[in-house]
Image: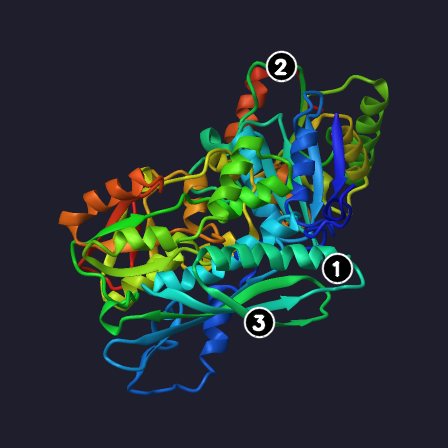
Amino acid sequence: MNEKLDLRGKLCPEPVIATKKVLDKKEVESIEALVDDEICVANLERLARSQKVHISVKKESGFYAVSLSRNLQTQADANIAGLPEAGQGAPDNSKTGTVLFITRETLGEGDAEFGKTLLGVFLQSMYESGHKPRAILLSNSGVKLLSSSSSSKKVLEDFKAGGSEVLACGLCVEFYGLKAEIATEQITNMFAICEYLNAADKLIQP
Amino acid sequence: MSPAEKHKLTANIKAQGCAAKLSPLELAQIVKSLPKVKSENLLCGTDNFEDAAVYKFSDELAIVSTIDFFPPLIDDPYLYGRIAAVNALSDVYAMGGKPLLALNVFCFPSCDYPLTLAEEIIRGGASAVDEAGCLLVGGHSIQAPEPIYGLSVIGTVSPQRILTNAGAKEADKIVLCKPLGMGVGLLSHKGGMLSENTYKELISNLCRLNGPCLEIALKYDLHAATDITGFGLIGHLHEMAKASGLKVRLNSKELPLLPEVLQCAEQGLVPAAAYANRKAYSEISRIDESVDLALSDLLFDPQTSGGLLFSVSAREAFQLAEELKQAEWPAKIIGDFLAGESGLIEVF
């Protein structure tokens, strides 16, 4: 279950108390909290640390969007030295499931534009099938699916809202210059990607 | 429902007690523009961030002058008044003085709150002034958008016995006399996260006059004193270390703490002023990696009505701490003054 909290305009300590109350509910897997300032963010970081949940922060204009999620372990174990995006952690190996590994922006080979459209159709069909993958991992030109101009961005957001993790390879995001367009929380590293693939019950690579 | 329950004093207050102070960086910026005053009788002025000004009248007599006030930190008006007055009187004690006269400083929005609340605030303040053996002789009150209360206090001290920030000596021990965590505790209480017992302990510390603590300590070989308030332990220790040309080694395992505050800080109940203090003192503090984040937050936590801190010769420190403990002050030896980079605070 994902919760959204708009805590803008609330005086300290209300933002951290309200977030903690929601986080204390076991059925809540992730929270997106909007807060006013860096102080609230710093306090939510302390909360995340103490509750051992993953946190990522995105600065918006005039406020901060803070995502807390239980699915990912804290980043400490999974960092790879030298990778700027090595922040996202490895998955919890006790959780298996289907993993989609998308390594290019097209489905199969052939006409490039047709390939892109086809990949969109594939993702949409997969979403509507009701089979919920545990994670969708994007690498190489596959990370472009998360760019703002991509027609597949919407369906990937739908997967995410449905509880699937949608993660992009950090090196690839950097290489294609998409850092500004992709939320930090969705950026992972190759180490974590390997962990997901190894833990998967079923791997689908379109 | 009592008037205090109906009209919550802290409902719209952003920062509680000494957490409402301008940050150290902001204060340094505005004090910079003050003209330097010099007088051979002015023993303590704006230099060295002392707790109060001291002016010498004769070889036997100097006056200590100070003012302190802040917005409500709890909803109980009597306790708020009491705590604000205790906190203001403390600056006189921190200079080694005895309070003589006090004036109320009072802002009150009488359109928003009933006057009975104002009476309670003043009454709470008067109780502390009276207990200090000081005379409350008047004051000034105005309408304002949020309540503010405190005192201007004049005290006396012998010019030979002034306790400034500047007197700490190499190898002195540092004795702290009240537990840390007032800022985190107040914020946690506001968030409903503090147990009844801890809240009681917090209030009893906030309401406790530092006078009797000073009285015991004056029997010992004290070299410097201050009280820990808005700039937190590290901020006030830094001022002392800087004024004395020494560095400090602080033992984080020996800090007296209020119960529960460590867990509250861990969960993110850290007041904004603690972050401002951390920022302001980041250059002059070196905190060992082994020190837990929540514990380091408490080093920067803004204290309201905090404890006296003494720099005392090593051979007497243990005895001082023991005698204070017998008088139920949770005094602890928390570190040493050492030769080294002036003003540096090392925490291990």
- Disc 3 to disc 2, how far (Cα)? 74 Å
Q: Tell which tag, 3 or 2, sits nearer the viewer.
A: 3
Q: Quadrant of the C terminus of chain A?
A: top right
On residue B115, the disc is: 1
User: Badge 1: few (under 14), some or many (20 or more) residues near its Cα, within 10 Å?
Assistant: some
Residue B17 is at least partly visible in this image: no
User: Badge 3: few (under 14), some or many (20 or more) residues near its Cα, within 10 Å?
Assistant: few
Q: Nearer the viewer, residue A68 or B170?
A: B170
Type of residue at label 2?
Answer: Thr
Q: Quadrant of the N terminus of chain A?
A: top right
Task: Name the residue beneath numbered marker 2.
Answer: A96
Type of residue at label 3?
Answer: Gly
Residue at 30% from the left image edge and 67% from the top image edge:
B164
Type of residue at label 1?
Answer: Leu
Task: Name the residue beneath numbered marker 3.
Answer: B138
Q: Position of residue B215 (x, y in %)?
A: 30, 54
- Disc 2 to disc 1, how far (Cα)? 65 Å
